[in-house]
Image (cartoon, helix red, strand yellow):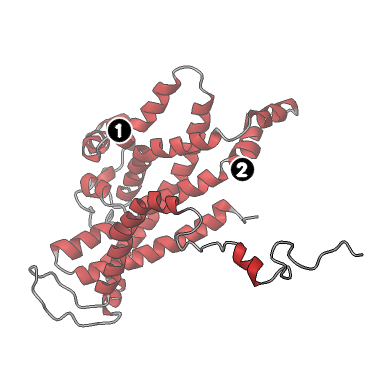
């Protein structure tokens, strides 16, 4: 007699039939995903991104393709579609071309200085044993201080009869730093680098904590000096932070407005320190051409995205 049963001992029906399938509960598909609570916690930021970033950008793109102008509330006017006319207007404007050249000079000076100095200073601060909190705060204070207050000190240093020109004496540039068409934007770049350095130092300090001390000890036993350890352990160990610092420095630099507005009186001399964002303010608010200003903003966003992609490729390397 065979011991193997071909049916269900309780119901007497064949195994695997419709009765057995009814006993197994079906899993309900959750359209919110496996972690719906995570969506709840991320919802405020998603709403912020959609309301403050995504919607204004989309609306700016819409404005840039229309003959748009400001009106009183609830006043309906015709805003015809003009295609790429606004883009042709800004790309053929010498002031716009000069502003992009200015911001290019700014980024060439500011971004490498920001990445290099913040990494070197963070590495030095990470090795400090005494007064560590004092030194870290001293670099961070300029970043949290209002630009209006700090600009006064910078003007005192770089004006024609300021402290720096007094020290340089006959070597001081003529015209002076902030009224010199060749030195105005580099001076603004140095100021922004100095002011924002504390924030990027903190980013690198956080990244340095993830590098094991055993790597430095092994390199020291093998005869590697401080420079060899820095170049072969520290720099690769903080590569992800370097990508972040490079991207943030580029984005904040491309949106430059406050510093040249305060330091050079609004882009002087003769537009040598004018930034695209400052031109957007002039054309959109002061001159009442929001369509042209929106087109300029869209071009700026595209340019920053392209630069960011190139930087990520160069700094971040190839992903595994």
Q: Quadrant of residue 10?
A: bottom right
The residue drawn where x is 51% and y is 19% is: 129
139 over 295 or under it: above or below? above
Quick one: label 2 or label 1, which is nearer the N terminus? 1
Residue 70 located left or right of residue 301: left
The residue drawn where x is 68% and y is 29% is: 214
Residue 230 placement (x, y as % from top left): 61, 35
Count the marks: 2
Q: Which residue is mark 2?
A: 236
Q: Quadrant of residue 77?
A: bottom left
Could you say whether the residue bearing mark 2 is in a helix, strand or loop? Answer: helix
Residue 84 placement (x, y as % from top left): 30, 79
Quadrant showing the N terminus: bottom right
Residue 246 placement (x, y as % from top left): 47, 49
The residue drawn where x is 68% and y is 71% is: 17
Quadrant showing the C terminus: bottom right
Asked if residue 168 shows in the view, the reply is no
172 or 82: nearer the viewer: 82
Quote the CA–CA distance across marks 2 and 1: 38 Å
Label 2: few (<14), some or many (≥20) within 10 Å?
some
3 or 166: nearer the viewer: 3
44 or 191: nearer the viewer: 44
Q: Which residue is mark 1?
A: 164
Residue 10 located left or right of residue 301: right
Residue 42 placement (x, y as % from top left): 39, 51
Outermost residue to the right:
1
């Amino acid at each position: 007699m065979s011991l193997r049963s071909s049916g269900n001992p309780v119901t007497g029906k064949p195994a695997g039939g419709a009765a057995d399938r009814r006993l197994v509960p079906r899993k309900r598909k959750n359209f919110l995903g496996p972690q719906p609570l995570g969506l709840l916690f991320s919802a405020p930021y998603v709403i912020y991104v959609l309301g403050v970033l995504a919607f204004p950008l989309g609306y700016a793109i819409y404005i840039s393709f229309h003959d748009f102008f400001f009106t009183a509330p609830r006043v309906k006017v015709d805003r015809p579609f003009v295609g790429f006319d606004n883009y042709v207007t800004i790309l053929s404007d010498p002031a716009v071309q000069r502003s992009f050249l200015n911001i290019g000079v700014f980024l060439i000076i500011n971004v490498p200085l920001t990445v290099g100095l913040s990494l070197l200073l963070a590495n030095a601060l990470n090795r400090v044993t005494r007064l560590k909190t004092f030194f870290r705060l001293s670099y961070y204070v300029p970043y949290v201080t209002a630009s209006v207050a700090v600009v006064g000190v910078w003007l005192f240093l770089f004006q024609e009869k300021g402290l720096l020109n007094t020290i340089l004496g006959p070597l001081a540039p003529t015209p002076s730093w902030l009224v010199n068409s060749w030195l105005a934007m580099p001076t603004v770049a140095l100021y922004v680098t100095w002011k924002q350095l504390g924030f990027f130092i903190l980013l690198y300090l956080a990244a340095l904590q993830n590098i094991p001390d055993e790597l430095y000890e092994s390199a020291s036993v093998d005869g590697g000096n401080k420079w060899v350890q820095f170049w072969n352990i520290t720099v690769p160990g903080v590569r992800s932070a370097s990508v972040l610092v490079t991207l943030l420095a580029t984005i904040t630099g491309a949106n430059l407005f406050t510093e040249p507005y305060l330091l050079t009186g609004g882009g002087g001399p003769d537009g040598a320190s004018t930034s695209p964002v400052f031109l957007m303010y002039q054309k959109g608010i002061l001159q009442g051409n929001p369509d042209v200003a929106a087109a300029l903003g869209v071009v700026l966003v595209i340019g920053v995205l392209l630069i960011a992609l190139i930087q990520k490729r160069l700094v971040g390397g190839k992903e595994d």
